[in-house]
Image (spheres, coloured by chain):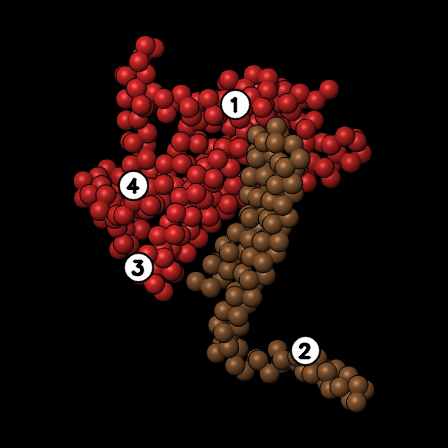
Amino acid sequence: MPEQLYLTRFLNAHFAGPVDALLRAFHQAPVYPEAPISNAVAMELLTVVVLLAYFLVVRMTLSVEKPGAFQQVAEMTHEFVSEQADSIISHGFQRFVPYLTVLFLFILLANLLGLVPGLESPTANPVVPLGLAIVTFVYYHLHGIRSNKAAYVKQFLGPVWWLAPLMFLIEVVSHCARVLSLTVRLYANMFAGDLVTLAFFSLIPVGIPLIFMGLHLMVAAIQAYVFMLLATIYLALAVSHEH
Amino acid sequence: MIRTAKYFFMAMAALLLAAPVYAQDAAAASSKGALYLAAGLGMALAAGLCGIGQGKATASAAEALARNPGARPGIFTFLILGLAFIESLALFTFVIIFIKVQ
C-alpha cells in the first residue's frame, strides 16, 4: 500500500469500488485494489473542485456597479492572459484565452497546493504535467489544422523542397520534444523544490526551510506562467499564416 | 625532471584506461559508489553551467532595461522564457540522475 494523504484515504474509503470497476472496464488492473486513487489524482480533484467553486462564486457575484474581491481577481487574471496572448498571437487571440487562463490557473493552484501542510503538489508527479503537455500538444495541432487547413503540413517541410524529407523528421522530433520539455520542466521544478525544502529540513529543522518554501512559492508562480507562455507561443506558431 | 613527470602521467593515464579491466571483479560492489560520484559531479556541472548561462541572460536583460526602461514588458517575457529554457537543461540532468540513483 502506498502512503496516502488524508484526502486520498477518504476518497479511497468511499469510491474504491466504482473506480476499480471503471479501471477494469478499460482493462487496467489496479495495483492496489483497495486504494486505486493515487495522491496525485486526489490532489487534482481537489484543484478542480476549488477552481469550480471559484468560477461559480465569480459568476454568481458578477456585478457591474460594485465588483467583489473575487471578480477583481478574475478580471486581473483575464486581463493578464489576454494581454500576453494579444502580444504573442495578435490576430484572433480571443479564441484561445479561455484555454490559456484555465491552464494557468490550474497549474498555479496545483503548484501552490504543495505549500499547504497535509497536501502535496499533483504536479510533483510526472503523470500530471505529462497530461497537461499532451492536451496542449493536441490543442495547438488541432488549431493549426483548423486555421491553416492542408497548408499546415507546409510548416513541417521547411523552406526548400529538396530538404523536405529531412526537415519533416526534424520537425516531428522537435514537436515531440516540446511535450517532453514541458513535462520535465514543470515536474522537475516542483519535485526539486519539495526535495530542497526537505533536505534543508533534515539539516536544520527550524527557520531555514522557510526560506526555501518562499523560494518554492516564487518558482510555483513562475512555472505556471512559463507553461502558459510556452503554450501561447506554440499556439501562435501553429496558427500563423505563412506568406 | 619534466620528462620523468610526463612519463609518469602517461603511465597513470594508461592505468586509468585499464581501470575497467580491474573493475570487472568488483563491478557489483563499486558500481553504486561510482554512480553517486557521477551523480554529484554531473549535477554540480549542470548547476554551475546553468548558473553561468542564467547570469549572462540576466545581466544582458538588466543592461537592456537600464538603456531602455520603456521596453520592460517585452524584455521581461523574453527573460523569463530564456531562463526557463536554460534551467530546463539542468532539470533534465536532475531527472536523469534521479532515475539512475533510485
Whether tag 4 and tag 1 are in contact, CB under 8 A, the answer is no
- Indicate left or right for A232 with A10 as reference: right
Q: In this view, does A49 lie above or below B59?
A: above
> Which residue is at a point 61% across and 41% down the rendered structure image?
B62
- Indicate left or right for A140 with B56 as reference: left
- Quadrant of the drawing holding the C terminus of chain A: top right
The Cα atoms of the two marked residues, 4 and 1, are separated by 33 Å
Q: Of the residues tagged 4 and 1, which is closer to the observer? A: 1
| Subunit ID for the residue under disc 1 | A
Q: Residues within 10 Å of mark 4 (few under 14, many from 20)?
A: many
Q: How crowded is mark 3: few (under 14 residues within 10 Å), some or many (20 or more)?
A: few
Q: Of the residues tagged 1 and 3, which is closer to the observer? A: 3
Instruction: State the residue position of label 1.
Output: A83
Element marked by disc 1:
helix
Determine which quarter of the picture holds residue A75: top left
Element marked by disc 4:
helix
Q: How crowded is mark 2: few (under 14 residues within 10 Å), some or many (20 or more)?
A: few
Whichever of labels 3 and 4 marks the residue nearer the N terminus, that label is 4
Chain B drawn colour: brown
The Cα atoms of the two marked residues, 4 and 2, are separated by 52 Å
Element marked by disc 2:
helix
The Cα atoms of the two marked residues, 3 and 2, are separated by 48 Å
Instruction: State the residue position of label 4.
Output: A42
Q: Residues within 10 Å of mark 1 (few under 14, many from 20)?
A: some
**Callout 3 and callout 2 share a chain:** no
Q: Is residue A232 visible?
A: yes
Chain A drawn colour: red
Whether tag 3 and tag 4 are in contact, CB under 8 A, the answer is no
Q: Of the residues tagged 1 and 2, which is closer to the observer? A: 1
